[in-house]
Image (tube, grey):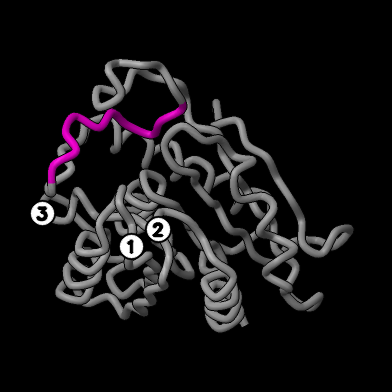
Amino acid sequence: MTYLPALELLSPRGCEATASVIWLHGLGADGNDFAGIVPELRLPSTLPIRFVFPHAPSIPVTINNGYVMPAWYDILEMDVQRRVDEAQLLRSAAAVHALIEREVERGVDSSRIVLAGFSQGGAVILHAALTCRLPLAGAMSLSSYFPTAGSIAQDPANAELPVLICHGTHDPVVHESLGRHADEALRAMGHPTRYHHYRMEHSVCLEEIRDISAWLQMILR
């Protein structure tokens, strides 16, 4: 099995992980993008988590004039609907499923695995989480959207998966309305969601990091 290359961090160090968080970066970034947040989460030593930060492959991106950059899928248009290459998104979701199975092989129960993603990464993890055949702990969608909401075939194993959605009120890249639409779609599908918005643009803030930490501790307690 070939897995996505990834940066891995164990918090706290030296402990055997009892939970895992697979965290996908956004367009043009790599797995290092969110590694610095781990110590800022200030998670208790009683909750040893392996954080897996995969690196996306580099592909041509249409909205950037075909420039090759790390991306989970091609974005074809930057209109309100955010038209994307869905086949590439599905392949990325399948690669996340492989990482989930590897965590299970490493001894982490699937019900203690969380998927997280920022922007493009959030779109992938929503699809990956809801179509995963193994029951997961939850999913985090950060400054993101849900492009496959109208076509996804959910797996019963995650029919009631809890989802945390965080978004900036001044996001010029992924408008907050897309985050709210994702929240509405997930609720309509029967998922318990928590929606938080912050006075920020397409980024992450300290208040959001604190909310993420509290949510992780709640679902992984």
Label 3 or label 1, whichever comes before in sequence order: 3
Distance from Cα at disc 3 to Cα at disc 1: 26 Å
Residue topped by disc 3: 150
The front one of 101 and 118 is: 118
Is residue 91 highlighted in magenta? no
As shown in the figure, which amino acid type bears the numbered disc 2? Answer: Glu
Q: Secondary structure at mark 3?
A: loop
Residue topped by disc 2: 201
Quadrant location of the C terminus?
Answer: bottom right
As shown in the figure, which amino acid type bears the numbered disc 1? Answer: His
Q: Is residue 67 above or below residue 153?
A: above
Distance from Cα at disc 2 to Cα at disc 3: 27 Å
Where residue 71 sits, quadrant-wise, is: top left
Q: Secondary structure at mark 2?
A: loop
Relative to 132, 205 lies left or right: right
Q: How packed is label 2: few (under 14 Cα within 10 Å), some, or many (20 or more)? A: some
Q: Nearer the observer, disc 3 or disc 1?
A: 1
Residue at 41 percent across and 73 percent down: it is: 198
The picture places residue 77, in percent across and down from the top left corner, at 16, 33
The picture places residue 7, in percent across and down from the top left corner, at 67, 40
Q: How packed is label 3: few (under 14 Cα within 10 Å), some, or many (20 or more)? A: few
As shown in the figure, which amino acid type bears the numbered disc 3? Answer: Gly
Q: Is residue 60 above or below residue 177?
A: above
Q: Which residues are magenta?
A: 70-79
Residue topped by disc 1: 170
Outermost residue, right direction? 14
